[in-house]
Amino acid sequence: MYFFKCIIDAFRPGIRYTFNVYGIQDDRSYLLEKKAKYLKELEPTDSLSLNIDKITMNSLTVSWRRYDQEFRAGFIRGYILYMKKNNQSCTAKESKLLIHAGSQVICTYNITKPNQTELTIRHLEPNTKYLLAIKAYTVKSEYNDNDNFTSVYTSADT
């Protein structure tokens, strides 16, 4: 039986390490498993830009480019779309509510598929200004007032 000793201080946060685990049988080694891991995953820092189209009086479609696949500080697990109403609390159905400082309620949509690049938001109010921002996340996404919000107006009720 062989043992491998590793100095944990040699590992740094945000660096992807690949581990190959080998077994030995009949004096021959063979690959049992290959794993990519992090000591600690870091969150992406670059903001994503949104395209907003198919705007109606009660819905809109948001699309974005997948986060850079060259990002190597963590595994992208999905996206969080933040939506707020201009100077009001957000109350959109099908969203999760986030209460932010100052008691402002922000709607969030958790997109758990890293390859997804589009979302249709329904149950909006006509002739209303909404502010939208999106972030990729690895472990968890933290809301930040500095997120780059894009404004859009839903169509007027006809």
Image: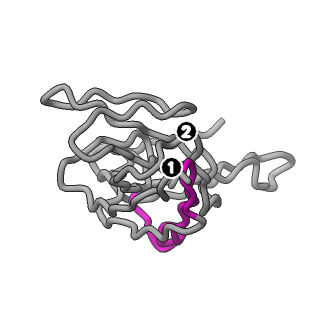
Residue drawn at x 25%, y 56% is 147
Q: Please name whichever residue, 104 or 155, is drawn nearer the observer in this view of the structure.
A: 155
Q: Position of residue 106 (x, y in %)?
A: 33, 36
Mark 2: which amino acid? Phe
**Secondary structure under badge 1?**
strand
Q: Nearer the viewer, mark 2 or mark 1?
A: 1
**Secondary structure under badge 2?**
loop
> Is residue 25 a member of the stretch shown in magenta?
no
Between the residue at mark 2 and the residue at mark 1, the CA separation in whole angstroms equals 20 Å
Give the image quarter of residue 85.
top left
Q: Is residue 128 left or right of residue 75?
A: left
In the image, is residue 86 above or below residue 28? above
Are there few (<14), some (14-19), or many (20+) residues within 10 Å of tag 1? some
Position of the C terminus, as image quadrant, is bottom right
What secondary structure characterizes most of the magenta part?
loop
Q: Please name whichever residue, 31 or 27, is drawn nearer the observer in this view of the structure.
A: 31
Q: Is residue 81 left or right of residue 151?
A: right
Residue furthest to the left in view is: 102
Q: What residue sits right under mark 2 in the picture? A: 3
Residue drawn at x 40%, y 37% is 107
Are there few (<14), some (14-19), or many (20+) residues within 10 Å of tag 2? few
Mark 1: which amino acid? Lys
Position of the N terminus, as image quadrant, is top right
Earlier residue among tags 2 and 1: 2
* Residue 37: image tag: 1
Q: Please name whichever residue, 141 or 121, is drawn nearer the observer in this view of the structure.
A: 121
Q: Magenta residues?
A: 55-73
Colour mapping = one colour
> Is residue 69 a member of the stretch shown in magenta?
yes
Q: Please name whichever residue, 50 or 127, is drawn nearer the observer in this view of the structure.
A: 127
Q: Is residue 147 left or right of residue 152?
A: left
Residue drawn at x 52%, y 51% is 157
